Amino acid sequence: MHVTLWQAVLIGLFTYLGALHTPWLLGCTGGWYGIGRPLVAGTIVGLILGDIKTGMIIGATINMVFIGAITPGGAMSADLNFAGFVGTSLAMLTGSTPEMAVSLAVPIGLVGAFAWNAWSTSNVFFAHLFDKYAAEGNVKNMKLSGIVLPQLTGFAFRFIPSFLVVYFGGSYGNILANAIPQWLANALTTVGTMLPAIGMALLLKMMITKFNLWAFFLLGFIGVSVLKISIVPLAVIGLALSFIVLYLKDTDKTDSKEEVA
Amino acid sequence: MEGNKTLTKKDLRKSWFTWFTYHTACWNWERMQNVAFCLCMEPILKKVCKNKEDYKKGLVRHTRFFNSEPQSSTIIHGMVASLEEQRAAGADITEDAIDAIKAGMMGPLAGIGDSMVAALLNTILLSIGISMAISGNLLGPVFFLATYVPIVTFGSWWLYKKGYELGASSINKIVGEGGLHKFTEAMSVLGLVVIGGLTASFVNVKTKLEFAGEATINIQKLLDGIMPGLLPLGLTFLVYYLINKKGISVTATMGLIFIFGMLLSILGIL
C-alpha cells in the first residue's frame, strides 16, 4: 500500500487532535480518551488509507496492549495515541498482520512518550510567562501564553514526528517489511500475544486493594476461558456481583446494629 | 471588573468548560495543570472580586501546583468557585483554606478518578467496542465514542455543579460515612470481573512444544486439558508481580517481554 502526501498530513493532523494536551475535542474526553484510543485511531487511519475494516481490526488489536494504560500524574510510559495512529498506519502500509502491528506499535509508542515529555518540559517556560500575565490580570495574554503558544508547540511535537514516520516509513517500510525473515515475523507475533498482559497487570495493580478481590478476577477469567461467555453478558454478571457485595455490606451493618440494640 | 456579584449558572458553566477543554493545554513538569486551574477560576474571580487587586491576587494564588484526574475532579473546581464567592462576600475563608482544599482533594480524587473513569469506565466501554471491532463490526468504535464521551462530559459538569452546591462541606459528605469507599469497592468488583474476562480473551500465549515419542504429546493440549488459559493467566500473574511487587517499570517490563518472547519463539517454545 502506498501513502500520499495528503494522507500522511491528515494522519499527522489526527494524531495531534487525539493527543492528551489537545483541547479541541472536549479536552481529553473526546481527544486522548476518545479518538486517541487505538480502536478509534485505527478506524480513522483505515478511513484515510481507504480500508476502514483493516484499520479498525489492527487498531483494536493494538488497543488490547494499551488497555490498562492510563497516565497517572502525567507519567507516560508509552503514548497510545501515537501507537494507535502511527502504528496502525505503518502496519497497513507494510501489510503486517494485526499481531505484528502490536510489536511495531510499542516502540512507536515510546517515541510518542518522548515527544510528550519534551513538550511538558518546554511548557515550564510558558507557565512562568503565564505567571507574569496573571499577576497583571491580563486575560488576553494569559490565554496566549497558557493556551495558544503551548498548543502551537504541541502541534509541532505531534504533527511533525507522526507525519515524518508515516510518510517516509510508509514509503520505505515496504522494502523493510519484505526483508523481515519469517522467524522474526513469528517472534514479533509471539511478543504481540504476550504484551496485553502488561495492560491487564496495570489495571490489576490499581484495582486489587485487598487480596480477596482476586476472586473476582479469577471468576471473570474462567467465565471467558472456560465458559466462553462474551464480554457484555460478563459485564452484566460483574454488575450483579457488585450489587450483591453492596447488599451484603448493608445487611452486615443492620445486623450489627440490631445486636447492639 | 464586575465586582461582588453572585455567580450564575452561566458563569459556572464557563468556568467548568474552560477547565474541561484546556486542562492539559499547558501541562508542565513544574506545576502540571496549574495554568488551566487559574484560567477556569478567572471568570469566577472576575465576577466576585470587589476590586482589581483582589482579582489579580486571586489569579496568582491559582497558579500554584495542581494535578488531578481532569475529567472527574471537577467537584474540586466547583467547590473552590463556591469558596471564592463566599470569601469575596466576606465569609471567613482564608487563602490557606482554599489551597488546603485543593491540595487535600486533588490526590484522592486523582486516585478515584483514574481508577473509576480512566481505567474502569473507559476500559469496559472500550473492551466492548474492541470485541465488536475484532469480529469486523464497524459499530465497535462508534459504540465506544457514543457512550464514553457523553457520559463523561455530563458527569464532569454534574460533579462541578455538585461541588459548587456543597461548598466546603462536600469533602466530609463524600469522604465521610464511608459511602464513596463502599461504592468504589463495589465498582472494582465489576471492574475485576471484566478485567478477568479481558485477560482470557486478549492474552493469547500458546506453547508449540511437542514431545515426539511413540505418540506425539502436544503440551498445549495437555495444559488445556487441565484448564484452558493457564499460560495467559500465569503470564499475567508474573507481569503483575514484576510491576507491583518488584517495582520494575512498565517500559522495562515491555523490554523483558520483547526479549524473552522473541527468544522463546526462536527456540520454538512459544
Image (cartoon, rainbow, N blue to C red):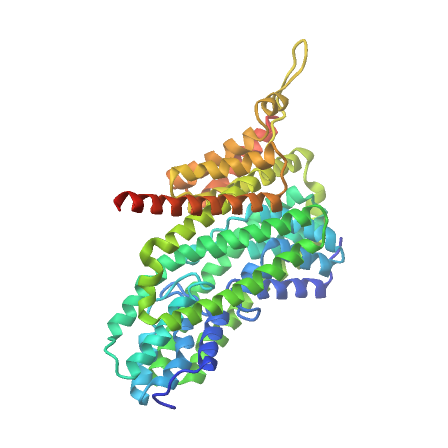
Q: Where's the C terminus of chain B, which quadrant?
A: top right
Q: Position of residue A19 (x, y in %)?
A: 54, 62
Count of numbered circles in the view = 0
| Farthest top residue in view | B214
Q: Is residue A236 left or right of residue B79?
A: right
In the figure, A249 relative to B73: above or below? above
Front-most of residues B170 and B213: B170
Q: Is residue B256 visible?
A: no
Q: Position of residue A127 (x, y in %)?
A: 39, 72
Q: Is residue B151 visible?
A: yes
Look at 61% across and 44% down and name the residue there. Answer: A233
Front-most of residues B56 and A252: A252
Front-most of residues A259 and A246: A259
Q: Is residue B3 left or right of residue B136?
A: left
Look at 25% across and 76% down and name the residue there. Answer: B93
Q: Position of residue A256 (x, y in %)?
A: 31, 44
Q: Is residue B99 left or right of residue B216?
A: left
In the figure, B38 relative to B204: above or below? below
Q: Position of residue B269 (x, y in %)?
A: 59, 26
In the figure, A216 relative to B70: above or below? above
Quarter location, residue B27: bottom left
Q: Where's the N terminus of chain B, which quadrant?
A: bottom left
